[in-house]
Amino acid sequence: MAGAEGNAGRQSELEPVVSLVDVLEEDEELENEACAVLGGSDSEKCSYSQGSVKRQALYACSTCTPEGEEPAGICLACSYECHGSHKLFELYTKRNFRCDCGNSKFKNLECKLFPDKAKVNSCNKYNDNFFGLYCICKRPYPDPEDEVPDEMIQCVVCEDWFHGRHLGAIPPESGDFQEMVCQACMKRCSFLWAYAAQLAGDQEVIKPGNGDHQDSTLKEEVLEPGKDAVNDPKAEQKNEPCTSSASECDLQTVVKNQSLNSESQSGCKLQELKAKQFIKRDAATYWPLNWRSKLCTCQDCMKMYGDLDVLFLTDEYDTVLAYENKGKIDQATDRRDPLMDTLNSMNRVQQVELICEYNDLKTELKDYLKRFADEGTVVKREDIQQFFEEFQSKKRRRVEGMQYYCS
Ligand SMILES: [Zn+2]
Ligand SMILES: [Zn+2]
Ligand SMILES: [Zn+2]
Ligand SMILES: [Zn+2]
Ligand SMILES: [Zn+2]
Ligand SMILES: [Zn+2]
C-alpha cells in the first residue's frame, strides 16, 4: 500500500489498475484488527441457548463475581448488554463454555438477554483467568509491576495464558509456531512427547537460573525404544477386525510392515513413534500449523484422548485459528457486501479514486476503533457497519461531484 498514496493517480496512466478487492484482500492488518475485536462470536444474542459453545469470546465480571466469589464467565453479548458499565476481564476465547450471566453465581444481577438459565453450568471449567490472573506466576495482565517485555501465549490444552519466560522453553524466535502446550499439560499428556520429537522440532530449553522460577527444574528423560510394554506389533493387530480370508490378512500384514514409517490406516502412529527414541523434558512445546492432523486417531488413541479430556486435539475446528477465520468470513460478508457491490458497478476512474481513498479509510477506521478502546467499550457489529455506511455515503457524494483525483 505504500506506493498507492502519492502516485496512484500517475501510475494508473501506465499500469493496469489494482482492483480494490485485491487491495482489501492483501491488507491483513485491517482484516485482523476488525477480527480481533469481533471474532466469530455473536454480539447480540446471549450464547446460552446454543449450550456449550465450541469456542467463543468470553469475559469475567469482577464487579459481579470478584475474587473470593464463585468464578463465572459471560458471553460477548452479555458483556455489552448486562455488564456494560462493569469491570470486565477479557478472557479472549475459550472452548466448550456456556454463558453464566445471571445464574446462581450472580447475587444481584438478572440477565437481560436470557434470564431463564439453569442454576449452574456443570460442564464449564474455570481457572484463575476468571479472576484476572494468568500464568504459573498468577499475575494480572497487563501487569503494572512487571517491567520485563514479554508476550503472553495461550496453552491450547488448558487455555491459560503464560509469559514466554515462564514456559521452561523459549518460544521459537519470529513466533514461528501455531500452537503451544504448556509445561503442566505436557506432563499430563506425556504421549505428546513422542510427537514432539517429530513435529515440534528442537526446543531450546531455559536453563535453571535463567528463569525467575526456582521450581522449574530441568529434567530430561530419554525413552529407549522397546521400553513401552504396549509396543508390540502383534498386540496392535488384535484390535483390528479381520473380515477377509486368511491369505488376504497375511498380505495386509506385509503391506503394513513395509509402510511402517508412513501413517497407515490400520496401524497406530503413536506406537510407531514410541518405538523410536525421544526425549521428555519439563518444558512447554511449540507446534506448527496443522500439527493436530498428524495425531493418531486409532481406537486406542481416541480412548486415551477421551480419558485425558483432550479429544478436541483431533478437531481442526477447535483451534483459535479456525475461530478467527470464521470471524473473518462473517465480517467479510458483512463488510464487503455494500462495498463490493458498489465497486463492481464502478468504472475504472471511479475505482482509482476509491483506491486513493483507501488509506484514508484505514486511518478513519483505526481512529474509529480507538475511540471505543479509549472509552473501554467493546465495538459491536453494527458500529462497524455504520462506519462503512457513512464512508460509502461520503464517497458517493464525492463520486457524484465528479472529483476523480486524489486529494
Ligand atoms: Zn450470555
Ligand atoms: Zn457484571
Ligand atoms: Zn446476560
Ligand atoms: Zn508468568
Ligand atoms: Zn496448559
Ligand atoms: Zn493410535
Image (tube, grey):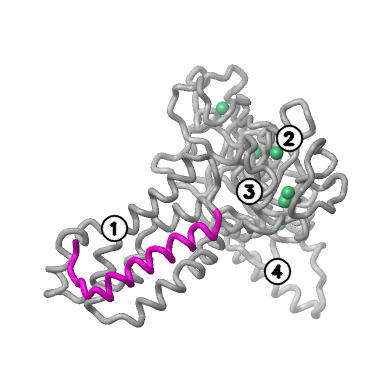
- Viewer-side label of 3, 4: 3
Seen at 72% across and 54% down, the residue is: 311
Dot 4 crowding, Cα within 10 Å, few <14, some 14–19, many 20+: few
Q: Secondary structure at mark 4?
A: helix
Q: Is residue 74 above or below residue 26?
A: above
Seen at 30% across and 62% down, the residue is: 358
Q: Are marks 4 and 1 in contact (CB under 8 Å)?
A: no
Label 1 to label 2, Cα distance in Å? 42 Å
Q: Earlier in the sequence, mark 1 or mark 2?
A: 2
Return the mark for residue 64.
2
Return the mark for residue 144.
none
Whole-percent x, y for residue 228 in the image? 72, 43
Residue situated in front as seen by the camera: 354 or 323: 354
What amino acid does circle 3 point to?
Tyr
- Range covered by the magenta-colored residues: 380-407
Q: Is residue 244 left or right of residue 339?
A: right
- Viewer-side label of 1, 3: 3
- The quadrant of the image that shows the C terminus is bottom left
Q: Earlier in the sequence, mark 2 or mark 4?
A: 2
Examine the structure image and report whether residue 154 is included in the region drawn in magenta: no
Question: Magenta stretch mostly in which secondary structure?
Answer: helix
Seen at 83% across and 47% down, the residue is: 121
Q: Which residue is mark 3?
A: 80
